[in-house]
Protein backbone atom coordinates (compact mmCIF):
# COMPACT_ATOMS: atom_id res chain seq x y z
CA UNK A 1 0.00 0.00 0.00
CA UNK A 2 1.44 3.37 -0.93
CA UNK A 3 1.75 6.23 1.52
CA UNK A 4 -1.04 8.34 0.01
CA UNK A 5 -3.53 5.48 0.14
CA UNK A 6 -2.43 4.63 3.68
CA UNK A 7 -2.88 8.28 4.72
CA UNK A 8 -6.28 8.40 3.04
CA UNK A 9 -7.57 5.22 4.71
CA UNK A 10 -6.09 5.96 8.12
CA UNK A 11 -7.33 9.58 8.00
CA UNK A 12 -10.83 8.43 7.08
CA UNK A 13 -10.98 5.71 9.76
CA UNK A 14 -9.50 7.84 12.55
CA UNK A 15 -11.65 10.78 11.43
CA UNK A 16 -14.77 8.61 11.64
CA UNK A 17 -13.78 7.29 15.09
CA UNK A 18 -12.98 10.84 16.20
CA UNK A 19 -16.37 12.00 14.96
CA UNK A 20 -18.10 9.07 16.66
CA UNK A 21 -16.56 10.11 19.96
CA UNK A 22 -18.97 13.07 19.88
CA UNK A 23 -21.53 10.56 21.18
CA UNK A 24 -20.03 11.15 24.62
CA UNK A 25 -21.08 14.80 24.41
CA UNK A 26 -24.89 14.70 24.94
CA UNK A 27 -25.36 18.24 23.65
CA UNK A 28 -24.35 17.28 20.10
CA UNK A 29 -25.56 13.69 20.05
CA UNK A 30 -28.49 14.64 17.79
CA UNK A 31 -26.08 15.75 15.05
CA UNK A 32 -23.86 12.70 15.36
CA UNK A 33 -24.28 11.49 11.77
CA UNK A 34 -23.31 14.87 10.33
CA UNK A 35 -20.36 15.10 12.70
CA UNK A 36 -19.10 11.64 11.69
CA UNK A 37 -19.42 12.42 7.97
CA UNK A 38 -17.72 15.82 8.38
CA UNK A 39 -14.95 14.35 10.51
CA UNK A 40 -14.41 11.53 8.02
CA UNK A 41 -14.12 13.98 5.12
CA UNK A 42 -11.71 16.09 7.18
CA UNK A 43 -9.66 12.98 7.92
CA UNK A 44 -9.65 12.04 4.22
CA UNK A 45 -8.34 15.44 3.17
CA UNK A 46 -5.75 15.49 5.95
CA UNK A 47 -4.70 11.91 5.14
CA UNK A 48 -4.15 12.62 1.44
CA UNK A 49 -2.11 15.76 2.20
CA UNK A 50 -0.03 13.99 4.83
CA UNK A 51 0.45 10.97 2.55
CA UNK A 52 1.74 13.15 -0.27
CA UNK A 53 4.07 14.89 2.18
CA UNK A 54 5.39 11.51 3.38
CA UNK A 55 6.13 10.53 -0.21
CA UNK A 56 8.27 13.64 -0.67
CA UNK A 57 9.87 14.04 2.76
CA UNK A 58 11.39 11.14 4.67
CA UNK A 59 11.57 12.38 8.24
CA UNK A 60 9.56 11.03 11.17
CA UNK A 61 9.71 14.30 13.05
CA UNK A 62 8.73 16.45 10.06
CA UNK A 63 5.95 13.99 9.22
CA UNK A 64 4.48 14.29 12.70
CA UNK A 65 4.83 18.09 12.70
CA UNK A 66 3.22 18.33 9.25
CA UNK A 67 0.39 16.03 10.42
CA UNK A 68 -0.10 18.26 13.46
CA UNK A 69 -0.21 21.38 11.29
CA UNK A 70 -2.66 19.95 8.74
CA UNK A 71 -4.87 18.48 11.48
CA UNK A 72 -4.83 21.78 13.32
CA UNK A 73 -5.70 23.90 10.26
CA UNK A 74 -8.53 21.65 9.07
CA UNK A 75 -9.96 21.29 12.57
CA UNK A 76 -9.73 25.06 13.03
CA UNK A 77 -11.71 25.60 9.81
CA UNK A 78 -14.38 23.13 10.99
CA UNK A 79 -14.54 24.80 14.41
CA UNK A 80 -14.91 28.20 12.72
CA UNK A 81 -17.82 26.82 10.72
CA UNK A 82 -19.38 25.49 13.93
CA UNK A 83 -18.83 28.80 15.75
CA UNK A 84 -17.67 26.98 18.84
CA UNK A 85 -16.29 23.78 20.38
CA UNK A 86 -12.77 24.94 19.43
CA UNK A 87 -11.02 22.79 22.01
CA UNK A 88 -13.18 19.74 21.38
CA UNK A 89 -12.57 19.86 17.63
CA UNK A 90 -9.05 21.27 17.26
CA UNK A 91 -7.31 19.18 19.93
CA UNK A 92 -8.37 15.70 18.74
CA UNK A 93 -8.11 16.76 15.09
CA UNK A 94 -4.49 17.82 15.63
CA UNK A 95 -3.55 14.59 17.41
CA UNK A 96 -5.22 12.48 14.72
CA UNK A 97 -3.10 14.42 12.19
CA UNK A 98 0.02 13.56 14.18
CA UNK A 99 -0.92 9.87 14.26
CA UNK A 100 -1.49 9.83 10.49
CA UNK A 101 1.79 11.74 10.03
CA UNK A 102 3.65 9.11 12.05
CA UNK A 103 2.01 6.17 10.30
CA UNK A 104 2.64 7.47 6.77
CA UNK A 105 6.31 8.07 7.57
CA UNK A 106 6.80 4.72 9.21
CA UNK A 107 4.69 2.51 6.99
CA UNK A 108 3.51 2.41 3.41
CA UNK A 109 5.54 1.85 0.27
CA UNK A 110 7.54 4.83 -0.96
CA UNK A 111 7.01 6.14 -4.48
CA UNK A 112 8.64 3.94 -7.12
CA UNK A 113 11.95 5.28 -8.41
CA UNK A 114 12.37 5.33 -12.19
CA UNK A 115 15.13 3.02 -13.39
CA UNK A 116 18.18 4.86 -14.76
CA UNK A 117 18.49 4.76 -18.52
CA UNK A 118 21.13 2.39 -19.86
CA UNK A 119 23.98 3.79 -21.81
CA UNK A 120 26.17 1.72 -24.04
CA UNK B 1 87.09 -8.34 17.55
CA UNK B 2 84.04 -6.20 16.79
CA UNK B 3 80.53 -7.57 17.18
CA UNK B 4 77.55 -6.52 15.12
CA UNK B 5 74.81 -4.69 17.01
CA UNK B 6 71.34 -6.21 17.32
CA UNK B 7 70.01 -3.50 15.05
CA UNK B 8 72.54 -4.28 12.37
CA UNK B 9 71.80 -7.98 12.71
CA UNK B 10 68.10 -7.31 12.37
CA UNK B 11 68.73 -5.28 9.23
CA UNK B 12 70.87 -8.02 7.78
CA UNK B 13 68.19 -10.59 8.56
CA UNK B 14 65.51 -8.42 6.95
CA UNK B 15 67.70 -8.01 3.89
CA UNK B 16 68.20 -11.75 3.63
CA UNK B 17 64.47 -12.41 4.12
CA UNK B 18 63.37 -9.88 1.53
CA UNK B 19 61.99 -11.98 -1.29
CA UNK B 20 63.60 -11.80 -4.68
CA UNK B 21 60.69 -11.35 -7.05
CA UNK B 22 62.80 -11.59 -10.20
CA UNK B 23 61.04 -13.72 -12.75
CA UNK B 24 57.60 -12.83 -11.40
CA UNK B 25 55.28 -10.05 -12.48
CA UNK B 26 55.51 -8.40 -9.07
CA UNK B 27 57.64 -5.59 -7.72
CA UNK B 28 58.16 -5.37 -3.98
CA UNK B 29 56.99 -2.14 -2.33
CA UNK B 30 57.04 -2.49 1.42
CA UNK B 31 56.63 -4.92 4.25
CA UNK B 32 53.15 -4.79 5.80
CA UNK B 33 52.95 -7.42 8.50
CA UNK B 34 54.16 -10.75 9.69
CA UNK B 35 51.65 -13.58 9.64
CA UNK B 36 51.72 -17.04 11.09
CA UNK B 37 53.70 -18.66 8.30
CA UNK B 38 55.44 -15.79 6.65
CA UNK B 39 55.61 -12.14 5.87
CA UNK B 40 53.06 -10.06 4.01
CA UNK B 41 54.38 -7.38 1.66
CA UNK B 42 52.74 -4.73 -0.46
CA UNK B 43 53.74 -5.35 -4.06
CA UNK B 44 52.88 -4.02 -7.46
CA UNK B 45 51.45 -6.30 -10.11
CA UNK B 46 53.35 -4.88 -13.08
CA UNK B 47 51.14 -6.56 -15.66
CA UNK B 48 47.88 -5.18 -14.33
CA UNK B 49 49.46 -2.10 -12.68
CA UNK B 50 47.75 -2.60 -9.35
CA UNK B 51 48.75 -3.02 -5.76
CA UNK B 52 48.51 -6.46 -4.26
CA UNK B 53 49.36 -8.05 -0.94
CA UNK B 54 52.01 -10.71 -1.32
CA UNK B 55 52.43 -13.36 1.32
CA UNK B 56 55.77 -15.17 1.26
CA UNK B 57 56.69 -18.22 3.23
CA UNK B 58 59.54 -17.86 5.72
CA UNK B 59 61.29 -21.07 4.86
CA UNK B 60 62.53 -21.97 1.35
CA UNK B 61 61.46 -25.61 1.43
CA UNK B 62 59.14 -26.10 -1.53
CA UNK B 63 57.91 -29.52 -0.52
CA UNK B 64 57.78 -28.84 3.21
CA UNK B 65 54.84 -28.72 5.57
CA UNK B 66 54.76 -24.94 5.59
CA UNK B 67 54.84 -24.68 1.81
CA UNK B 68 52.02 -27.18 1.70
CA UNK B 69 50.09 -25.12 4.19
CA UNK B 70 50.61 -21.84 2.35
CA UNK B 71 49.55 -23.47 -0.92
CA UNK B 72 46.56 -24.84 0.89
CA UNK B 73 45.68 -21.43 2.32
CA UNK B 74 45.74 -20.01 -1.20
CA UNK B 75 43.50 -22.81 -2.43
CA UNK B 76 41.10 -22.33 0.47
CA UNK B 77 40.88 -18.63 -0.33
CA UNK B 78 40.44 -19.33 -4.02
CA UNK B 79 37.36 -21.43 -3.37
CA UNK B 80 35.84 -18.75 -1.16
CA UNK B 81 34.65 -16.07 -3.54
CA UNK B 82 32.69 -13.72 -1.32
CA UNK B 83 32.72 -9.93 -0.82
CA UNK B 84 33.65 -10.51 2.83
CA UNK B 85 36.65 -12.72 2.12
CA UNK B 86 39.88 -11.37 0.75
CA UNK B 87 40.31 -12.77 -2.81
CA UNK B 88 43.48 -14.54 -3.85
CA UNK B 89 44.95 -13.59 -7.25
CA UNK B 90 47.94 -15.80 -7.85
CA UNK B 91 50.16 -18.45 -6.29
CA UNK B 92 53.71 -19.42 -7.18
CA UNK B 93 57.25 -20.18 -6.11
CA UNK B 94 60.12 -17.71 -5.93
CA UNK B 95 63.58 -18.35 -7.33
CA UNK B 96 64.84 -19.22 -3.84
CA UNK B 97 62.16 -21.89 -3.46
CA UNK B 98 59.84 -19.97 -1.19
CA UNK B 99 56.15 -20.30 -1.90
CA UNK B 100 54.11 -17.12 -2.22
CA UNK B 101 50.63 -16.04 -3.10
CA UNK B 102 49.13 -12.69 -3.88
CA UNK B 103 45.78 -11.39 -2.76
CA UNK B 104 43.78 -8.20 -2.84
CA UNK B 105 45.54 -5.33 -1.13
CA UNK B 106 43.07 -4.17 1.51
CA UNK B 107 43.40 -0.55 2.50
CA UNK B 108 41.78 -0.08 5.85
CA UNK B 109 42.08 -0.84 9.52
CA UNK B 110 42.03 -3.94 11.62
CA UNK B 111 38.72 -4.38 13.40
CA UNK B 112 40.23 -3.75 16.83
CA UNK B 113 41.58 -0.40 15.59
CA UNK B 114 38.53 0.53 13.54
CA UNK B 115 36.16 -0.15 16.41
CA UNK B 116 37.63 2.76 18.38
CA UNK B 117 35.95 5.07 15.89
CA UNK B 118 32.55 3.34 16.06
CA UNK B 119 30.86 4.30 19.32
CA UNK B 120 27.39 3.11 18.34
CA UNK B 121 26.52 -0.43 19.45
CA UNK B 122 24.08 -1.04 16.56
CA UNK B 123 26.79 -0.01 14.06
CA UNK B 124 29.21 -2.45 15.69
CA UNK B 125 26.64 -5.20 15.58
CA UNK B 126 26.02 -4.51 11.88
CA UNK B 127 29.76 -4.97 11.33
CA UNK B 128 29.52 -8.22 13.21
CA UNK B 129 26.68 -9.41 10.99
CA UNK B 130 28.85 -8.86 7.93
CA UNK B 131 31.62 -10.94 9.49
CA UNK B 132 29.01 -13.62 10.14
CA UNK B 133 27.96 -13.50 6.47
CA UNK B 134 31.52 -14.25 5.35
CA UNK B 135 32.01 -17.03 7.90
CA UNK B 136 28.61 -18.55 7.11
CA UNK B 137 29.59 -18.58 3.43
CA UNK B 138 32.86 -20.35 4.27
CA UNK B 139 31.00 -22.91 6.39
CA UNK B 140 28.61 -23.47 3.53
CA UNK B 141 31.63 -24.25 1.36
CA UNK B 142 32.89 -26.63 4.02
CA UNK B 143 35.69 -24.44 5.41
CA UNK B 144 36.32 -23.54 9.07
CA UNK B 145 38.41 -20.44 9.74
CA UNK B 146 39.63 -21.46 13.22
CA UNK B 147 41.41 -18.19 13.94
CA UNK B 148 38.65 -15.58 14.03
CA UNK B 149 39.67 -12.58 16.12
CA UNK B 150 39.60 -8.78 15.73
CA UNK B 151 43.12 -8.72 14.27
CA UNK B 152 42.00 -11.01 11.45
CA UNK B 153 39.17 -8.79 10.29
CA UNK B 154 39.85 -5.74 8.16
CA UNK B 155 37.47 -2.86 7.62
CA UNK B 156 38.16 -1.10 4.34
CA UNK B 157 38.05 2.59 3.57
CA UNK B 158 34.50 2.27 2.23
CA UNK B 159 33.24 0.20 5.12
CA UNK B 160 33.78 -3.18 3.49
CA UNK B 161 34.46 -5.96 5.97
CA UNK B 162 36.99 -8.64 5.04
CA UNK B 163 37.89 -11.76 6.96
CA UNK B 164 41.62 -12.37 6.60
CA UNK B 165 44.25 -14.96 7.45
CA UNK B 166 42.80 -18.30 6.48
CA UNK B 167 46.11 -20.01 7.23
CA UNK B 168 44.58 -22.19 9.92
CA UNK B 169 41.44 -22.99 7.96
CA UNK B 170 40.19 -26.54 8.06
CA UNK B 171 38.41 -28.05 5.11
CA UNK B 172 35.50 -30.14 6.26
CA UNK B 173 34.14 -31.26 2.93
CA UNK B 174 37.03 -31.41 0.56
CA UNK B 175 36.53 -30.70 -3.08
CA UNK B 176 40.07 -29.35 -3.28
CA UNK B 177 42.78 -32.00 -3.22
CA UNK B 178 44.38 -31.13 0.06
CA UNK B 179 45.49 -33.06 3.02
CA UNK B 180 48.01 -35.81 2.82
CA UNK B 181 47.96 -38.29 5.70
CA UNK B 182 50.34 -36.08 7.66
CA UNK B 183 48.19 -33.04 7.15
CA UNK B 184 49.50 -30.21 9.28
CA UNK B 185 45.88 -29.48 10.14
CA UNK B 186 46.03 -32.29 12.57
CA UNK B 187 48.60 -30.62 14.73
CA UNK B 188 48.02 -26.93 14.61
CA UNK B 189 46.82 -26.53 18.11
CA UNK B 190 48.41 -24.89 21.06
CA UNK B 191 51.34 -26.84 22.31
CA UNK B 192 50.91 -27.55 26.03
CA UNK B 193 54.38 -26.23 26.75
CA UNK B 194 54.25 -23.28 24.43
CA UNK B 195 54.18 -19.74 25.71
CA UNK B 196 50.72 -18.25 25.21
CA UNK B 197 50.53 -15.42 22.74
CA UNK B 198 49.88 -11.90 23.92
CA UNK B 199 46.14 -11.26 23.93
CA UNK B 200 46.24 -8.48 21.38
CA UNK B 201 49.47 -9.17 19.58
CA UNK B 202 49.06 -8.79 15.84
CA UNK B 203 50.60 -12.07 14.83
CA UNK B 204 48.94 -13.93 17.65
CA UNK B 205 49.08 -17.05 15.59
CA UNK B 206 52.62 -18.07 15.05
CA UNK B 207 54.22 -21.22 13.83
CA UNK B 208 56.54 -22.32 16.54
CA UNK B 209 57.61 -25.53 14.99
CA UNK B 210 56.37 -28.09 12.57
CA UNK B 211 52.73 -28.56 13.33
CA UNK B 212 52.53 -26.49 16.49
CA UNK B 213 50.69 -23.22 16.38
CA UNK B 214 49.70 -20.80 19.08
CA UNK B 215 46.10 -19.79 19.00
CA UNK B 216 44.62 -16.67 20.49
CA UNK B 217 43.47 -17.14 24.07
CA UNK B 218 39.92 -15.98 24.51
CA UNK B 219 38.98 -16.50 20.88
CA UNK B 220 39.80 -20.17 20.57
CA UNK B 221 37.06 -22.64 21.48
CA UNK B 222 37.82 -25.00 24.40
CA UNK B 223 37.85 -28.05 22.11
CA UNK B 224 40.29 -26.29 19.76
CA UNK B 225 42.49 -25.30 22.69
CA UNK B 226 42.50 -28.92 23.84
CA UNK B 227 43.42 -30.07 20.38
CA UNK B 228 40.29 -32.16 20.23
CA UNK B 229 40.24 -32.38 16.44
CA UNK B 230 37.43 -34.87 16.26
CA UNK B 231 35.04 -32.40 17.87
CA UNK B 232 35.92 -29.49 15.61
CA UNK B 233 33.09 -28.26 13.47
CA UNK B 234 31.45 -24.94 12.69
CA UNK B 235 30.52 -24.48 16.34
CA UNK B 236 34.20 -23.90 17.03
CA UNK B 237 34.07 -20.83 14.77
CA UNK B 238 30.79 -19.88 16.45
CA UNK B 239 32.66 -19.75 19.75
CA UNK B 240 35.21 -17.38 18.19
CA UNK B 241 32.40 -15.29 16.71
CA UNK B 242 30.77 -15.15 20.14
CA UNK B 243 34.05 -13.91 21.63
CA UNK B 244 34.24 -11.33 18.84
CA UNK B 245 30.68 -10.25 19.63
CA UNK B 246 31.57 -9.81 23.31
CA UNK B 247 34.61 -7.79 22.24
CA UNK B 248 32.51 -5.53 20.00
CA UNK B 249 29.82 -5.06 22.65
CA UNK B 250 32.31 -4.29 25.41
CA UNK B 251 33.59 -1.07 23.81
CA UNK B 252 37.33 -1.65 24.07
CA UNK B 253 39.74 1.22 24.21
CA UNK B 254 39.91 4.42 26.15
CA UNK B 255 38.24 6.69 23.64
CA UNK B 256 34.82 5.12 23.85
CA UNK B 257 32.85 4.99 27.09
CA UNK B 258 31.59 1.56 28.11
CA UNK B 259 28.19 0.87 26.62
CA UNK B 260 25.22 -0.60 28.36
CA UNK B 261 24.76 -4.19 27.37
CA UNK B 262 21.39 -5.65 28.02
CA UNK B 263 20.50 -9.14 29.09
CA UNK B 264 19.56 -10.29 25.59
CA UNK B 265 22.93 -9.40 24.13
CA UNK B 266 24.67 -10.97 27.12
CA UNK B 267 22.62 -14.11 26.55
CA UNK B 268 23.62 -14.24 22.87
CA UNK B 269 27.30 -13.88 23.84
CA UNK B 270 26.93 -16.54 26.53
CA UNK B 271 25.19 -19.00 24.20
CA UNK B 272 27.74 -18.49 21.42
CA UNK B 273 30.67 -18.95 23.79
CA UNK B 274 29.25 -21.86 25.79
CA UNK B 275 31.96 -24.31 26.82
CA UNK B 276 30.06 -27.28 25.42
CA UNK B 277 29.65 -27.14 21.63
CA UNK B 278 26.16 -28.65 21.91
CA UNK B 279 25.01 -25.65 23.94
CA UNK B 280 26.12 -23.16 21.29
CA UNK B 281 24.23 -22.02 18.22
CA UNK B 282 24.25 -24.80 15.69
CA UNK B 283 25.05 -22.49 12.77
CA UNK B 284 26.38 -19.02 12.10
CA UNK B 285 23.05 -18.22 10.45
CA UNK B 286 21.30 -18.89 13.76
CA UNK B 287 23.72 -16.63 15.61
CA UNK B 288 23.41 -13.79 13.12
CA UNK B 289 19.62 -14.16 13.06
CA UNK B 290 19.59 -13.72 16.85
CA UNK B 291 21.81 -10.62 16.61
CA UNK B 292 19.53 -9.25 13.86
CA UNK B 293 16.50 -9.86 16.05
CA UNK B 294 18.25 -8.05 18.89
CA UNK B 295 18.98 -5.11 16.58
CA UNK B 296 15.34 -5.01 15.49
CA UNK B 297 14.16 -5.01 19.10
CA UNK B 298 12.67 -8.50 18.80
CA UNK B 299 13.00 -11.35 21.32
CA UNK B 300 16.14 -13.46 20.92
CA UNK B 301 16.23 -17.24 20.98
CA UNK B 302 19.07 -17.26 23.52
CA UNK B 303 16.87 -16.04 26.32
CA UNK B 304 13.27 -16.31 27.47
CA UNK B 305 11.81 -12.95 28.45
CA UNK B 306 9.59 -12.24 31.45
CA UNK B 307 6.24 -10.52 30.85
CA UNK B 308 7.41 -7.09 32.14
CA UNK B 309 10.42 -7.35 29.81
CA UNK B 310 8.14 -8.20 26.88
CA UNK B 311 5.98 -5.16 27.70
CA UNK B 312 9.04 -2.92 28.04
CA UNK B 313 10.44 -4.15 24.71
CA UNK B 314 7.09 -3.64 22.99
CA UNK B 315 6.98 -0.10 24.38
CA UNK B 316 10.57 0.60 23.22
CA UNK B 317 9.74 -0.59 19.70
CA UNK B 318 6.49 1.32 19.41
CA UNK B 319 6.96 4.23 21.78
CA UNK B 320 5.90 6.96 19.35
CA UNK B 321 2.53 5.51 18.28
CA UNK B 322 1.83 4.38 21.86
CA UNK B 323 2.48 7.91 23.13
CA UNK B 324 0.37 9.46 20.35
CA UNK B 325 -2.59 7.15 20.97
CA UNK B 326 -2.22 7.60 24.73
CA UNK B 327 -2.19 11.37 24.25
CA UNK B 328 -5.34 11.15 22.14
CA UNK B 329 -7.15 8.97 24.69
CA UNK B 330 -6.06 11.11 27.65
CA UNK B 331 -7.17 14.23 25.81
CA UNK B 332 -10.54 12.63 25.00
CA UNK B 333 -11.08 11.62 28.62
CA UNK B 334 -10.15 15.12 29.85
CA UNK B 335 -12.51 16.74 27.34
CA UNK B 336 -15.26 14.39 28.47
CA UNK B 337 -14.68 15.24 32.12
CA UNK B 338 -14.63 18.99 31.45
CA UNK B 339 -17.70 18.87 29.19
CA UNK B 340 -19.69 17.11 31.96
CA UNK B 341 -18.93 19.88 34.51
Image (cartoon, coloured by chain):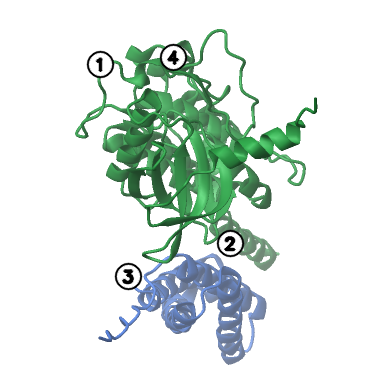
Chain colours: A blue, B green
Labels 4 & 1 near each other (Cβ < 8 A):
no
Provide residue B65's location: percent of width, then percent of height. 37, 23
Q: Nearer the viewer, mark 2 or mark 3?
A: 3
Tag 3 subunit: A
Marks 4, 3 in one chain: no
Q: Which mark is residue B332?
A: none
Q: CA distance from mark 1 to mark 3?
A: 62 Å
Q: Which chain is disc 4 placed on? A: B
Q: Secondary structure at mark 4?
A: helix
Chain-order first, disc 4 or disc 1: 1
- What is the chain letter for disc 1? B
Q: Quadrant of residue A85?
A: bottom right
Q: Which residue is mark 4?
A: B223
Name the spot of residue B330 as percent of width and height, x first.
63, 58
Element assignment for label 1: loop
Residue farthest along the top direction in this orientation: B193
Where does the N terminus of chain B fall, quadrant-wise? top right
Would you place residue B107 above or below residue B275 in this image? below
Task: Decide if residue B33 is on the left or right side of residue B101.
Answer: right
Q: Nearer the viewer, mark 1 or mark 3?
A: 1
Same chain shared by disc 4 and disc 1? yes
On the image, the x and y values in percent for residue A86 come to 65, 81
**Mark 4 and mark 1: span between their CA atoms?**
22 Å
Indicate which disc, 2 or 4, sits on the residue closer to the N terminus. Answer: 4
Identity of the residue drawn at 47% across and 67% down = A103
Q: In the image, is residue A25 above or below residue B292?
A: below
Q: How far is disc 1 from disc 2 in space, using C-alphas?
A: 69 Å
Could you tell me if the residues under marks 2 and 4 are in contact, i.e. CB atoms within 8 Å?
no
> Which residue is the site of mark 3?
A1
Instruction: Please give the residue where the numbered disc 1 appears in the rendered image.
Output: B181
Amino acid sequence: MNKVLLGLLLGAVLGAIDGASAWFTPAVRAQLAGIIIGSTVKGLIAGIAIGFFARKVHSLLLGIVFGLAVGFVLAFIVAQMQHGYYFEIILPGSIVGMIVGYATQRYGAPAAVAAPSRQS
Amino acid sequence: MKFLSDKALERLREGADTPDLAGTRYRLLERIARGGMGVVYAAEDQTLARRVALKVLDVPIPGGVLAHRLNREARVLARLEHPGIVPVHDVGTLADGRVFYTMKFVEGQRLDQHIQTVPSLPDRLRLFLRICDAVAFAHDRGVLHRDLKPANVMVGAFGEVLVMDWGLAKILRDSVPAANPADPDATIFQSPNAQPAEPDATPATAVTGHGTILGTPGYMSPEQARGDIAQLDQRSDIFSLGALLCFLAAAPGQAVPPMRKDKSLDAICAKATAAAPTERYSSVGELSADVSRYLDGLPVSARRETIPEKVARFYRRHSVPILLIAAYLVMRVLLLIFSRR
